[in-house]
Amino acid sequence: MRNFVLSGLFATTASFAAYGSIQGANAGLQSVVRDSAGVTVVENERPAAGTRLGWRIGPAPTLSIGAVEGDPAYELFRVADATRLPDGRIVIANAGSAELRMFDETGTHLGSWGGEGEGPGEFGRGGPSGVGRWPGDSISASDTYARRFSVFDADGEHGRTSSLPDPYWRLIGVLPEGKLFVGTVSSFRYTGGEFPDGVARIDLEYGIVEADGSAHSTLGTHPGAEWSASAENMSVRPHPFSRSPIYAVWGDRVVIGANDRYEIRAYATDGGLARIVRRDHDPRRPTRADLDEYYARQYESRTGEERSAALAAVADMALTDAFPAFSSIRVDELEHLWVEEYRQLGETGRLWTVFDPAGRVLGFLETPPGLRVFEIGPDYILGAAYDEFQIEYVQLWPLDRGG
C-alpha cells in the first residue's frame, strides 16, 4: 500500500497562495555587528508587523506519509523526529512502535528497524527520541531515557550503540567533526531540602562528548524550564507560560540558553562564547486573566465537579515574570537561524524570524499551521502534522528561497 493524503488534510491551505509571500516591504532591516572582548555581537531590529520575507513555501506538501488503516508501516504514532537523506529517502523516528522507518522519495516504505528492547539497535520505552544524519552516509538515533544513541548505516544495518556519560541524558546534535552535543533532560528533580513554592527552575548541564561517548568538554549549566511548585502538596506541574531551554547545532558551534529574552548565544566546542544574536523584543508579563483563560480553554471539555476541581487546583498558581521571548529555534542546512515567535492564546499560525548565517535578520516567514518542523533543507521543510481526524503524517513542503 502506498501513502496517501486524506481529502481535506490541511483544508486551511486553500486560503494561501503560498506561505511566506510578501505582504509588505521588509527591505532595509538594521543589523549592528560589533566585537565585545572577542565575542561577535549582532543587534537586530524587529521586522515590521505584517511583512514577510520573500521566500515562498508551497501551498501543499509534495509528499505526505501516513495512513488511516492498511499496511501498519504507514500508520504513524508519536513521531518524535524525521530526517531526509541526500538521496531523498526519509527516516522517521516512530516512538509509538520504538522503530526507525525508512521511506523512499515517493513515500514507499523500504523497511523498519529497532523495536523495543535493550539489545543492540533497539530502543527503550519512548524511543527513538530523535534521528539525524551521521558524518558520512550513516544515521544516528537517540534514545533519551535509555541514555544512549545508536548509529546505523544508510540501509539500516546497526553499527554501534554508545552510552552517554554522566551527567548527560540526551543527544542534542552531531557536530561536523563527529563530536556530540549533549545535555541533561529538562525535568524537575527534587534533591532534598526545602521544597520550592511558586515558580521553580532547575539548571541543566551541557557538554561535548566524543563519538564513542567519552567526555570531551563541559559547557556549564544553563536555566531549564519553569515549573509550578506547591510546597503544601510537594507537587510540581509544568507551567503553561514556562520559559524554557533552547539548544541547537549551528555550524561548528552550539547554541545554549533560555528564551527568557530574545538572545541567542553560540559557543565554541571548548565552551568559549563565540557569538550573541539579539533582536528587538517588548517583553510582556502574564496576568491572572491570561492564566484563567488558558485553563478555561484547557478544561472546557470537562463538566461539573471535575471541571471545578481542575480549576481550583490551579487557582493559586504563581505567575512567571514574563512570557517567553520566542518558542523554539531551528538551524537549516545553509546555517540560517530560524526563531519561532511565541504564540499567545488563540493564535494558530507559526511565524518565524529568519537570520542569515552571520546572525543578521532577514525577515518573517510563516510555515503551515499545525506543522511541527523537524528539518529545513535548501529547498524543503520536513515536519509532522495531524489531520482533522488526528491521524499523524510526516510531510515534505517545498521551499523557494528566491525573492
Image (cartoon, rainbow, N blue to C red):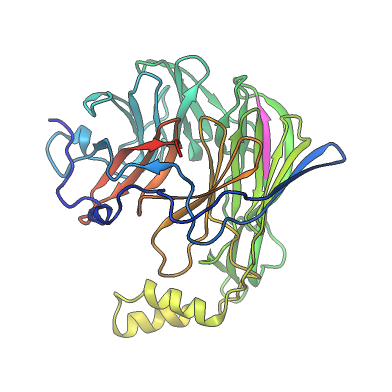
Query: Is 83 situated above or below 188?
Result: above
Quadrant for the N terminus in the image? top left
Would residue 166 be seen by someone viewing this image from the given angle?
A: no
Q: Which residue is depicted at the point 57% across and 63% down?
A: 242
Q: Is 10 one of the magenta-colored residues?
A: no
Q: Position of residue 212 (x, y in %)?
A: 60, 20
Q: Which residue is depicted at the point 38% across and 71% down?
A: 298
**188 and 28: which is toward the camera:** 28
Q: Position of residue 15 (x, y in %)?
A: 27, 56
**125 and 291: which is toward the camera:** 291
Q: Position of residue 5 (x, y in %)?
A: 18, 42
What type of secondary structure mainly makes up the magenta span?
A: strand
Query: Is 245 situated above or below 269?
Result: below
Query: Is 43 situated above or below 374?
Result: below
**24 and 186: which is toward the camera:** 24
Q: Is residue 137 left or right of residue 299?
A: right
**340 and 231: which is toward the camera:** 340
Q: Which residue is depicted at the point 37% across and 48% down?
A: 19
**Magenta range:** 205-209
User: Looking at the rendering, which quadrant does residue 57 occupy?
Assistant: top left
